[in-house]
Image (tube, rainbow, N blue to C red):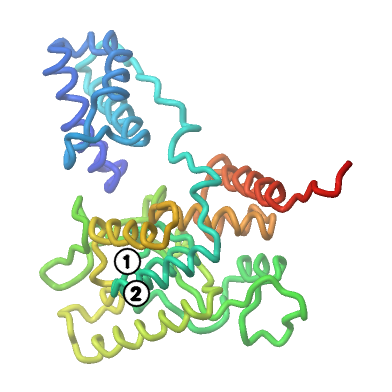
Amino acid sequence: MQKRKSPYGYKNSVHYLRYYVLPYFLNIAQNNNINNWHLSYRKFKIWLEDDAKLIRNPKKNISYSSKNHAVKSLNTFMRHLKAEGIVNELHICVAFDESKLNEKSIDDVISEDESWIVYKKLRELKYDNEAEYFLMLYWTGMRFNEGLGISLADIYKGEISRDSLKNLLRRNLIFHKDDKNIPSEYFHRYFGFFTLSSQPDNGGSKSIVRDKCDQVLRKPLKMKKAINERNTRIIPVVCEELWKILCRRAKAQYKLWKNNHYLSRNQSDYLLFDGIVQTTSMFRLKEAFEKSNLKYRSWHCCRHSRGTFLHGKTGDKELSMQWLGHASEKVHNKYIHTYEGLMREIQAKEMDWSDED
């Protein structure tokens, strides 16, 4: 039932059920009567808070979001058992406070100056793949896994044709570089754009997975149930240096495509950033921050930074939500508060009280 309802999300449910829910109730709580499991919900949440560990790193506690994934998996399991008549009553375990999920602060924002410092340091360290990937995530606000799936089929040179987005961009003084009506004062020019309709389905792996025909396994974007035009996100490229990098990579992939490098003839299987591995890239990014004498910020902080500056500079929630792919205003509002706090911090540093009586 869960697989039919959520063909991609059910794998997460199975993971948390297998490694956290069942081990707790059957082994730790030693409760074999499933009708009484709800009596241990409070202790289950305490265990998740204090003792639950990562499967791949048993010395490290699971993240706040993983705790809620475990609770969600438990509730999904109990709903299924109730529908099958296995449990007498449905008791829902209350989730943890969502306001703390993926909570980021001012300290997690990467300034534009810092982004160039980190980019150049990655270059110095000969981590060219990570350097260019960092620049892409920073300027586009893509999630890490979304960026991995960007292919030859997703990059376009011309002006955005979706009128709703094009009008939003113009309203916020963002124009295509060849637009003849660019005003003297504008916020950004964009050089091309991405269409983002799916992300790699790596099945728990930290790198890209291909089938026997060399096709990249894919799944819908986060919070989407299907891969289609309706769920496609369009992201302008407003950094000229990044656009040059993307054009070079697209040309290289086009050459591979013309030479039948893979069995697949679909351009969506020719990835612009093939070779990026999540675990390796995390260590390399951390090294670049440390050797630049900067506080380490994760890959996801690139997205957090883009959301913060995008809303802060335009004040347009509709544009920001379309750009980043947010369906919920509640999730998006965190960028407003972060930007306001960031501006207050900058103002405080610039204040000069020396001439005051």
**Residue 185 image-quadrant placement:** bottom right
Q: Are marks 1 and 2 in contact (CB under 8 Å)?
A: no
| Left or right of residue 241, residue 317 in this image | right
Q: Which part of the image, by quadrant, shows the C terminus?
A: top right
Q: Position of residue 44 (x, y in %)?
A: 27, 18
Helix, strand or loop at mark 2: helix
Disc 2 marks a residue whose amino acid type is Glu
Q: Is residue 65 rendered to the left or right of residue 110?
A: left
Query: Mark 2 Cα within 10 Å, few/some/many (few <14, many 20+)?
Result: few
Q: Is residue 340 left or right of residue 295?
A: right
- Please state, as top left, top right, bottom left or bottom right, where the N terminus lies in the image: top left
Say how many tags the image has.
Answer: 2
Residue 323 appears left or right of 251: right
Please tell me which residue is depicted at 21% across the width and 25% down the height of the picture: 21
Local packing at callout 1 (Cα closer than 10 Å; few below 14, some 14-19, many 20+) is many
Mark earlier in primary sequence (1, 2): 2
Taking the spot 56% from the left edge, 74% from the top edge, the residue there is 238
* Label 1 secondary element: loop
Which residue is drawn at the image coordinates 69% and 55% (left, top)? Answer: 315
Q: Quadrant of residue 46?
A: top left
For residue 189, above or below residue 198: below
Residue labelled with disc 2: 124
State the separation of the CA atoms marked 1 and 2.
26 Å
Disc 1 marks which residue?
149
Which amino acid type is marked by label 1? Gly
Task: Pick the residue in front: 228 or 32.
Answer: 32
Check residue 221 in the rendering and tell me which mark sits there, or answer none: none
Q: Which picture quadrant has residue 285?
A: bottom left
x, y (%) of residue 273? 31, 72
Establish if 214 lies above or below 59.
Answer: below
Q: Whole-percent x and y of residue 281?
A: 28, 61
